[in-house]
Image (cartoon, grey):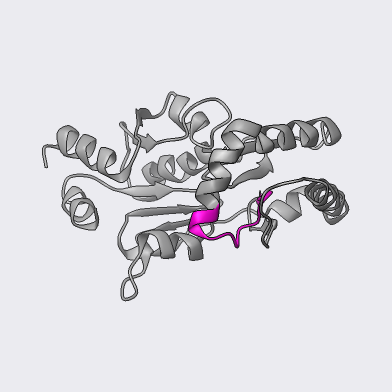
Amino acid sequence: MLQLLSALRHKCAVGFVGGSNLVKQQEQLGTPSLPVTALFDFCFAENGLTAYRLGQPLGSSSFIEWLGEDRYKALVNFVLRYIADLDLPVKRGTFVEFRNGMVNISPIGRNATVLERNAYEAYDLTHHVRRDFIAALQARFADYGLTYSIGGQISFDVFPAGWNKTFCLRHVEAEKERSGVEYTTIHFFGDKTGKGGNDYEIFEDGRTVGHVVKSPEDTMRIVKELFEL
């Protein structure tokens, strides 16, 4: 994959966007000897609330400053009480992960092993734990102006309305003023593109050309076809 992305950068600018923080993205995409910010032209952590261009940081936005400490505490207290009452086959640790631009909530806990994550994902597909959890949060905090987005196997993200993955597009559009480069075609590849998935908004956005993928291999196949690599 990294070799393909390197070849692709000779034809166009390449970037990624995800809900995880930069540390997690380094683990997922980088190498021990090479920072992930050197592998891409644009790096958008936490949906672009933390952003890098050519290895240099761009402006960031803060979830806690937007929401306020008192409201944040009310939200977290509700989440922890809700999780305490859940009867799941397995519970581990790190149920709430505070990030710069959002909060990630995991009913099973982010410390779950790979096998436990796989088992929970299958369990959640049948029992709809995350869907029901989100419904409870939407009812309790209807006036908070928050968006809830399921992504990955074991968790969902909570962030201000509009701070989904489309947030990163403002950095791309700003290139016209910053460097004189205007990106008129933006291809997006994602797997959680259905409504409620964390790729839905950017996939449906009129500024992008969306591609549904099922795996890294599927992504590579489409990229090779599109860019004749």
Q: Nearer the viewer, residue 10 or 33?
A: 33
Residue 48 appears in the picture as rendered: no
Q: Left or right: where does residue 179 sit relative to residue 222? A: right
Q: Left or right: where does residue 227 sit relative to residue 63? A: left
Where does the C terminus fall, quadrant-wise?
top left
6 relative to 219, above or below: below
Q: Residue 49's x, y, as percent?
A: 56, 51
Residue found at the very far front of the displayed protein: 89
Q: Left or right: where does residue 2 sit relative to residue 10? A: right
219 relative to 195, above or below: below
Residue in view at x 46 percent, y 30 percent = 193
Q: Left or right: where does residue 58 sit relative to residue 30? A: right
Q: Residue 124's x, y, as percent?
A: 61, 38
Residue in view at x 83 percent, y 36 percent = 141
Q: Residue 172's x, y, as percent?
A: 41, 43
Residue in view at x 62 percent, y 35 percent = 162
Q: Which residues are magenta?
A: 103-116
Q: Nearer the viewer, residue 197 or 45?
A: 197
49 relative to 192, above or below: below
Residue in view at x 75 percent, y 54 percent = 65
Residue 119 appears in the picture as rendered: yes
* Magenta span contains residue 104: yes
